[in-house]
């Protein structure tokens, strides 16, 4: 076993399983995906630490536990079509690619989207489509989605994203001000857009979701 594999298994044990993440598919995916490849070489030795790391362009790869918490909340079985908003390094995208049938991911910064595409191709994650643009509009042509994951902090839940969920579909999104947010799970209950069940998954701190239905840049 190489040293990164050892670090990864330890990360899942001490940071993820120990904090209550139970979904065996999520745990397995996190033991498998080489997180160190998604950060620059100088940071590879810190890739399995219990914190976010910079990925350039003033953006971050999220803390492993938060990634696990959000991913588990999507309740993926392998058959779903998932929309991710905020591709960033592509690490979370790689996990989703392993856990769902198809992943559509939107990133507003082209250099990050390009880097993520290269890594996802290297990992043979061919069930991922990446688009550069403002993800707060969602991806109407590809909708509806069984699950939507927003990996940046929003002032409110964009109604347009709820519209692109299937009935019973789950939206996970950090909602709050520009400093702290509440990780929110919204499950669509009926055709009526406002008819969602909202659950609070705890406090978090994300970079801004910038766009038409997010914050101004
Ligand atoms: N999940 C990513 C990973 O594993 O590396 C980390 C995502 S990072 C915390 C948030 C990302 O959301 C940034 O890359 C940022 O550029 C992107 N972002 C912010 N607003 C966006 C928008 N309106 N549409 C698409 N991406 C956006």
Image: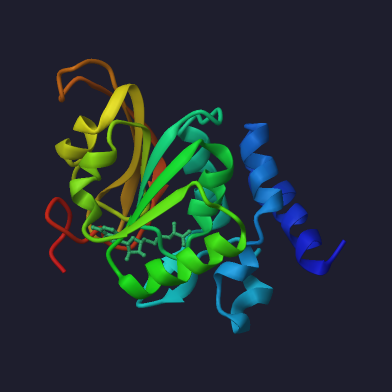
Q: What residue sits 17% from the left and 54% below the top?
A: 214
- Quadrant in which the C terminus appears: bottom left
Q: Does residue 61 appear left or right of residue 19 in this picture?
A: left
- Above or below, 138 against 163 in this view is below
Left or right of residue 115, residue 151 in this image = left
Q: What residue is drawn where x is 36% and y is 30%?
A: 170
Residue depicted at 19% across the width and 44% down the height: 156
Q: Is residue 102 visible?
A: yes
Q: Nearer the viewer, residue 79 or 16?
A: 79
Q: Position of residue 166 (x, y in %)?
A: 30, 24
Is there any visible trace of residue 20 in the rendered image? no
Within the displayed image, which quadrant is ligand 1 positioned in?
Answer: bottom left
Quarter of the image for residue 149 reads: top left
Give 16 or 74, whichever is nearer the viewer: 74
Along the line of sight, which residue is nearer the eye, 165 or 54?
Answer: 165
Q: Quadrant of the N terminus?
A: bottom right
């Amino acid at each position: 076993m190489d040293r990164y594999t050892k670090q990864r298994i330890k990360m899942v044990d001490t940071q993820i399983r120990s904090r209550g993440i139970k979904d065996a598919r999520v745990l397995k995916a996190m033991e498998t995906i080489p997180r160190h490849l998604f950060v620059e070489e100088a940071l590879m030795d810190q890739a399995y630490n219990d914190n976010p790391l910079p990925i350039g362009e003033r953006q971050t790869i999220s803390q492993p536990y938060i990634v696990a918490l959000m991913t588990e909340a999507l309740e993926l079985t392998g058959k779903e079509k998932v929309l991710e908003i905020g591709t960033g390094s592509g690490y979370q995208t790689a996990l989703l690619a392993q856990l769902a049938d198809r992943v559509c991911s939107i990133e507003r910064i082209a250099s990050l989207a390009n880097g993520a595409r290269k890594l996802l191709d290297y990992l043979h994650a061919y069930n991922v489509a990446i688009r550069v643009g403002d993800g707060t509009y969602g991806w109407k042509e590809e909708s509806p989605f069984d699950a939507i994951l927003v990996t940046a902090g929003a002032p409110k839940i964009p109604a347009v994203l709820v519209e692109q969920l299937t009935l019973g579909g789950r939206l996970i999104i950090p909602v709050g001000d520009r400093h702290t947010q509440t990780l929110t799970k919204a499950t669509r209950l009926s055709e009526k857009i406002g008819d969602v069940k909202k659950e609070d998954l705890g406090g978090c701190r994300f970079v801004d979701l910038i766009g038409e239905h997010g914050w101004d840049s």
